Image (spheres, rainbow, N blue to C red):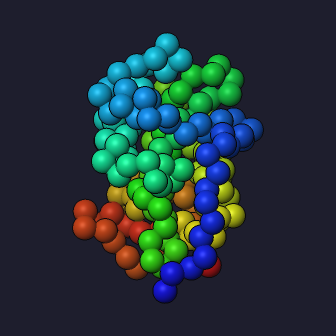
Amino acid sequence: MQTNISALSAAPLEGALVRLVLLTPEELKLVASGGRLDWYADGYPRQDDSDAAKMWLRAGEADRVWSVRHVIRRSDGLAVGSIGFFGPPDENGEAEIGYGLVESARRQGLISDAIALSVAAAEAAGARVIAHTAADNLASQGALLKAGFVRDDGENEDGEWRYARPA
């Protein structure tokens, strides 16, 4: 059953600690290749960031507003990670979120701020947000719980636990 999903805004999402900026097609290519700009923190892009950019390069332009965004730390203007969806919402209206930060940016509330912004935007567009995380990734589980996700009985093909926001 397809739900009514509106377009996700391409505008930056502004939070208290982070600013989320959609990667341009040129930045997708750069991040996919592991390239860097002077406003990227040490260690960014990580392999997961490059993998996300590669996924969206293969997907094409049509659904790019659901793709990966830089997580830019407001305190210094550096990109410290990425957040985005694995694709536009599926036939059930669900969109899976993925995210990560460089080690030096963790445990500062940045990912919690980024998740809250992304979830609010997706839900405003009519999507239900889900996530998967490894059983031993306590930091990710904590961030999801803080954002109002609950663990359900599902797992993905990698055995990662499924979390969803209540409908």
Q: Residue furthest top?
A: 38
Q: Is residue 34 visible?
A: yes
Taking 3 as reference, is 40 above or below it? Answer: above
Left or right position of 10 against 59: right
Left or right position of 15 against 122: right
Taking 46 as reference, is 92 above or below it? Answer: below
Q: Residue furthest front?
A: 62
Q: How many marks?
A: 0
Q: Position of residue 125 (x, y in %)?
A: 65, 64
Q: Residue furthest left?
A: 157
Q: Position of residue 78 (x, y in %)?
A: 57, 22
Q: Residue at x 36, y 31 (%)?
A: 29
Q: Residue at x 32, y 33 (%)?
A: 32
Taking 96 as reference, is 9 above or below it? Answer: above
Q: Quadrant of the C terminus?
A: bottom right
Q: Residue at x 62, y 29 (%)?
A: 73
Left or right position of 14 against 140: right
Q: In the depicted view, which residue is nearer to us: 126 or 151?
A: 126
Q: Position of residue 153 (x, y in %)?
A: 40, 79
Q: Residue at x 35, y 57 (%)?
A: 134
Q: In the depicted view, which residue is nearer to us: 131 or 2?
A: 2
Taking 61 as reference, is 149 above or below it? Answer: below
